[in-house]
Image (cartoon, helix red, strand yellow):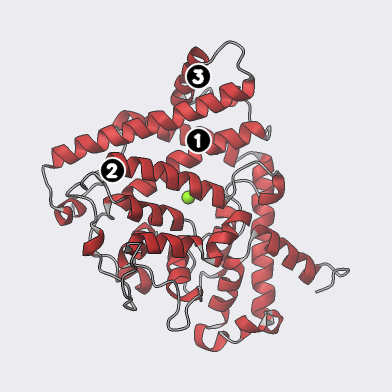
Amino acid sequence: MESLSPLAMKTDLSKGRDYPEKDHPFRNSYQRDRDRIVHATAFRRLAHKTQVLVTHTSDHHRTRLTHTLEVAQISRTVARQLHLNEDLTEAIALSHDLGHPPFGHAGEYALRDCMVNHGGFEHNRHALRIVEELEYPYANYPGLNLTWEVREAMALHSKVPDCPEVKKYLKYKQPFLEAQVADTCDSLAYNAHDIDDAISLGIIEFSDLEGSKIWKMAFAKAQEVLPKEATATQTQLGAIRILIDMHVYDLVENTRKNISLAKSTNLEEVRNMETSVVCHSPEIEELKHELGAVLKQKIYNNFRVQRMANKGARFVKRLFSEFSENSLQLPERYTARIKAQGLHRTVCDYIAGMTDRFAQDEYMKIFNPYFDV
Ligand code: MG
């Protein structure tokens, strides 16, 4: 194996786990973190949670699970090219969306509104709560007992740095470079796959992306390199591949440039810089931003996407108020936790853990008079 960059997080230097454990003979700490994440209930539930389109829309579009896998594979490639810690990068990427409630960001904002006077809700913060408290595979301690570094990546991603469970992780201005990689690959992955899904499901057509220069470049390149017999779908997929490649090349090259400009081999120093070293060049960043704005207008604000998002938000809010008004409707495992966690946090945990499908079933059971409970 090639040697790691001086700016990579070295597995041997991990701050370790809250509950100390013996080393494993075959797997290092970050590989064990990765495996714990993959074996977690919250990870499996990602299969039935909305990325952009509600999971029952079709069998072919991305769910939060397949999105996560795409982020992980792109992140690993980038980490390897930059000689960063691939195992840590993979664990961070696989865990990055664990805290998402059902119905994507619409569900998240609905829960945030419900919890506004009860401590708030945000998905990164909830991911921390899942891995520190809510998962229960071990008899001796709560949570997954992940290493500090994977938990820190979640905390530094949080939009609510002031809350106590996040605050304890905030020593540096920037996350580990491995976390910076996973974060950048998250947005480049969803830009690319959201286009693919939206075209495939007839939400947009190629012409709707006219406002994005980088898409037009990728599309023109696909037409240039593909044989004349290529179908529209093959051209679409070719353009998506080229779009991802353009971003990844730029990310690797520009990060190498930033690292050499930083003239530091000291990880602490680089983490205390004002900006991330892992980032796109200003040109690609601008094009990525422009693409994001086009996607917002044409995909995320599309009436079909909006209707389902709003419907999902409505389910979340109505379930929240119903369970809060009469908590005896919660399963016993949850009512038992109200005393220690408080009523609203317990209801929030229950709803945040739901898949789209489970939330829809619960909604029918609770509100449809002809449904058995
Ligand atoms: Mg994501």
Left or right of 103: which side holds 126?
left
Kind of residue at badge 3 = Ala
Question: Looking at the image, which residue is at 69% across and 54% down?
Answer: 311
Q: Which mark is residue 127?
A: none
Is residue 215 in view? yes
Who comes first in sequence, dot 1 or dot 3? 1
**In front: label 3 or label 2:** 3
* Residue corresponding to mark 1: 192
> Label 2 sits on what residue type?
Val
- Where residue 263 appears, x then y in whole percent? 11, 42
Spatial CA distance of label 3 from label 2 is 27 Å
Q: Earlier in the sequence, mark 3 or mark 2?
A: 3
Q: Which residue is mark 2?
A: 278
Q: Residues within 10 Å of mark 3 (few under 14, many from 20)?
A: many
For numbered disc 2, what is the local secondary structure? loop
Could you tell me which secondary element the residue under label 1 belongs to?
Answer: helix
* Left or right: residue 161 compared with residue 11: right
Crowdedness near tag 1: few (<14), some (14–19) or many (≥20) residues, C-alpha within 10 Å:
many
| Position of 143 relative to 88 (above/below) | below
Q: Earlier in the sequence, mark 1 or mark 2?
A: 1
Residue 333: x and y in percent read 62, 82
Quickly name the residue at label 3. Answer: 222
Task: Give the residue at x 38% y 48%.
Answer: 183
Q: Nearer the viewer, mark 1 or mark 3?
A: 3
The amino acid on which the numbered mark 1 sits, given as a three-letter code, is: Ala
Ligand 1 closer than 8 Å to label 2 CB: no
Q: What is the number of callouts on the image? A: 3
